Amino acid sequence: MISFILNLFLLEDDVATWSIDIDRESCIGSGVCLVYAPNTFVHDDDAKAVVVDGATDDLESVQNAVQGCPTRALRLIVEEEV
Ligand code: SF4
């Protein structure tokens, strides 16, 4: 399991810090998360999902990516609202 920290826009001016856990054992490299949130997820050399530095997708896109993962390899956790 690896975790990534990212800031996502909640509403117009509200930002929260989130973390995304990726269970590499469960990731089958389907690419669904890359379709829903292409500015957040990429595949590494092992075709496993990782989060890019400076991810720019909005919260809804990332939530759709998490919900669309066929193996439930992604978990989105709010860390702090600012
Ligand atoms: S949608 Fe899930 S299984 Fe597919 S690449 Fe992303 S994390 Fe891996």
Image: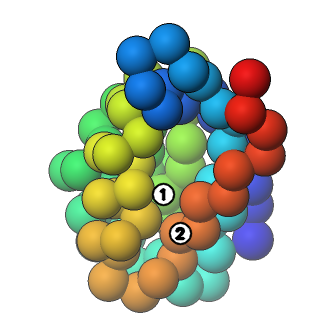
Residue lying furthest left in this view?
35
Residue 69 drawn at (x, y percent) = 35, 74
Determine which residue is flagged by label 1: 49
Q: Is mark 2 within 8 Å of ligand 1?
A: yes
- At a point 43% along the width and 26% down the height, the residue shown is 11
Give the numbered dot on residue 28.
Answer: none
Residue ID at (74%, 23%): 82
User: Dots 1 and 2: beta carbons under 8 Å?
Assistant: yes
Residue to which mark 2 is pinned: 74
Q: Nearer the viewer, residue 56 or 28?
A: 56
Q: What amino acid type should be assigned to the residue bearing mark 1?
A: Ala
Asked whether residue 38 is in view, the answer is yes
**Side of 73 relative to 29 (left or right):** right
Image spot of residue 78 (x, y percent): 69, 50
Q: What coloring was used for the rendering?
A: rainbow
Dot 2: element: strand
Determine whether 21 is above or below 70 in the image: above
Please report whichever mark, 1 or 2, sits nearer to the chain's N-terminal start: 1
